[in-house]
Image (cartoon, rainbow, N blue to C red):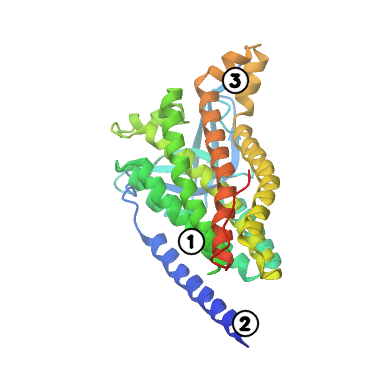
Amino acid sequence: MDKLSTSFKKSKKEILFSALFFIIIAILIFIPTGFEKNIYVNAEGVRAKIIDVDNTSIYNTGMINQGEQTATIKILSGNHKGKEIQGTNMLTGKLEFDKFFEPGDTAWALIEQDSSEKIIFANLIDHYRIGNEILLVSVFAVLLIVFSGFTGVRTLLSFLFALLSIWKILIPLMLKGYSPILVSLFVGNALTITTLLLVGGFTKKSYAAIISSISCSFITAITALAFGHIFEINGAVMQWSESLIYAGFKNLDLTGILYGGIYLASSGAILDLAIDISSALEEIQINHPKVSRKSLFDSGIRIGKSVVGSQTTTLLLAYMGSYISVMMVYMAQGTNIITIFNSKPIAAEVLHTFVGCIGLVLVSPLTSFVSSIYFTQVDKTEDIKISA
């Protein structure tokens, strides 16, 4: 009966916590970022159906297309819904930005209008993908709930909270000039705590994982700062970072944003490994209540040895995968390997990858140590001896 009562209390607490998070998420959705002002005066974003296209104004230079594609479009949303007008798709010669439209496509267009709301110009921004993105997210959510039940619901809450925290808190505070490192630590640790409580519940394994994850987060941030300074890498190496300066944010600490991003990217892998090890050790303690602290610690180290290897490789693949095209360009040009790894973009990725790996290596023994103390009760005469 005591176990049943304890389980009921935990479930009630988790349900109340999840309900509280629904409220917090709802509040975050409606909190303004402070950057809602549209820089495009008298403009409206709308969905539009491509009726017909005209490619006669496009000219080719090798593989590059430049000029403009005109199209007859039917507006599907907004104040001018139902109207058919001419839209323009400007081609810049950059494959990463350029797009082509075919009849039947759905586009996202920016409609410019005068003071009397008469349409002056329609710029075809890109293909409209929101519907397909919602479909993909819905498939993920359904599969997660089907296979994970209420834990899946809590995981979705955690996912949504993380997304909103980054969009509504982290990015606006950085744009307003607050310290990127401090903001990243605050948001990252808040996400760590809430994610582990939502997914793991109010349990010893969650508390142990929180303690070790937060401890490692500070080590990771310090390591990023130290080696970033040694590597002499500045924040301009980040994609589109210079655009922020040209947009009027001259006083932004781009290097601090780089370091904050390194910590934030590794914090997810750190909390994942921490909860894996603490969950395994909790199961050992449940099945063997008289297990000693030393034995539990040794088990955590052995578990960590197996998991850390795969996790660090996962982190390496995740980070380097985004730079595969850059590496291919270097190799195609016959660039020397020393030159490749000495270049600023690759050195930044090395910093990104191995700072995260250091955090992963350290979280294993730290989680084992915290869990061994937290999960067991031993005689006063018994000591914890950490073997090499």
- Quick one: 199 or 312, which is closer to the camera? 312
Residue 69's spot in the image, x, y percent? 55, 30
Dots 1 and 3: beta carbons under 8 Å? no
Kindly identify the amino acid type of the residue bearing the numbered disc 3.
Answer: Ile
- Marks 1 and 3, Cα distance to the nearest angstrom? 48 Å
- Quick one: 80 or 224, which is closer to the camera? 224
- Camera-nearest label, 1 or 2: 2
Q: Which residue is labeled 1 in the image?
A: 194
Residue 244's spot in the image, x, y percent? 37, 33
- Camera-nearest label, 1 or 3: 1
Name above or below for residue 171 compared with residue 250: below
Q: Residue at x 57, y 20 (%)?
A: 341
Q: Residue at x 46, y 23 (%)?
A: 231
Kindly identify the amino acid type of the residue bearing the numbered disc 2.
Answer: Lys
The N terminus lies in which quarter of the figure?
Answer: bottom right
**Extreme residue in the bottom direction:** 1
Q: Which residue is labeled 2 in the image?
A: 3
- Quick one: 269 or 69, which is closer to the camera? 269
Q: Is residue 359 visible?
A: yes
- Marks 1 and 2, Cα distance to the nearest angstrom? 25 Å
- Quick one: 50 or 348, which is closer to the camera? 348
- Camera-nearest label, 2 or 3: 2
Q: Which residue is labeled 3 in the image?
A: 64
Q: Earlier in the sequence, mark 2 or mark 3?
A: 2
Kindly identify the amino acid type of the residue bearing the numbered disc 1.
Answer: Thr
**Numbered disc 1: secondary structure:** helix
10 Å neighbourhood of mark 1: few (<14), some, or many (≥20)?
many
Dots 1 and 2: beta carbons under 8 Å? no
